[in-house]
Amino acid sequence: MTDFAAARLNMVESQVRVNAVTDDRVIAAMSAVPRERFVPVSRQGLAYMDEDIRISDGPPARFLMEPRVFAKLAQLAAITADDLVLDIGCGTGYSTAVLSRLAGTVVALESDENLAAQAGATLSDLGVDNAVVVAGPLSGGHAKQAPYDVIFINGMVSAVPEALQKQLRENGRLVTVVGDGVSGRARLYLKAGGGFGGRDAFDANIRFLPGFEPVESFVF
């Protein structure tokens, strides 16, 4: 039988701290949330591995982001206890559970209704009371609760949709990994003075979030 508490500690010490994650709140949150509760029972033994974990066969297949990249993105977002966070592509709710320990309120958006239902049930079972899971297309965000202080995108994107840019509050932050599926860079975007711009933060190569893949162009 897997000792999940020991596996969680090992994840934090060998994957998170050693990769320049120094934010005590992020470390505490990831030390407290039982990651194994957010993966299928058949894959719980893999829950703390340093890789993307398949949580749904889809189609399209969905994955839980590897701990190292997730932790660094959460730190990059600099979430405070007063922030309203939009968690895009929450899957089974692990990201929401962690972010809920950093933020004031989390709105978790999920396009797969089965995953959204799982996320809501697990979060409720764990006593997370400052997050709500909503179902809908990921690339459109959730304008009903906008503007957000932080938008966290759980997967690689080819570009940040304008709809999400509009849902950020002035001085709001958006974190994601931008890439082509072969390589990627984590980026921190800021909205200020009506503009929206970003900077590279670190290398990362994770799975595309459905709906954010590159649009193929045809040459005639």
Image (tube, rainbow, N blue to C red):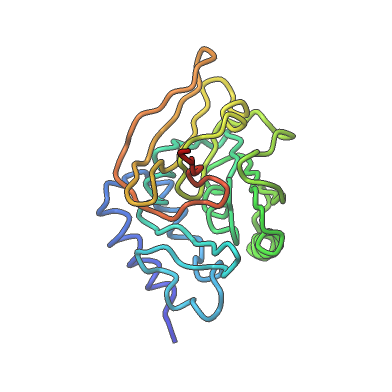
Total marks shown come to 0
**Residue 54 x, y percent position in the rendering:** 49, 68
Q: Residue at x 49, y 65 (%)?
A: 35
User: Considering only vertical position in the picture, is 2 above or below 123?
Assistant: below
Residue farthest to the right? 144
User: Considering only vertical position in the picture, is 126 above or below 26?
Assistant: below
User: Considering only vertical position in the picture, is 82 above or below 216?
Assistant: above
Q: In the image, is 2 to the left or to the right of 148?
A: left
Residue farthest to the top? 193
**Residue 39 x, y percent position in the rendering:** 54, 70
Q: Residue at x 62, y 45 (%)?
A: 138
Residue farthest to the left? 18
Q: In the image, is 136 to the left or to the right of 66?
A: right
**Residue 136 x, y percent position in the rendering:** 71, 48
Q: Residue at x 35, y 60 (%)?
A: 12
User: Considering only vertical position in the picture, is 92 above or below 209?
Assistant: below
Q: Nearer the viewer, residue 205 or 37?
A: 205
Residue farthest to the front? 220
Q: Quadrant of the N terminus?
A: bottom left
**Residue 102 x, y percent position in the rendering:** 52, 44
Q: Nearer the viewer, residue 64 or 105?
A: 64
Q: Residue at x 41, y 33 (%)?
A: 188
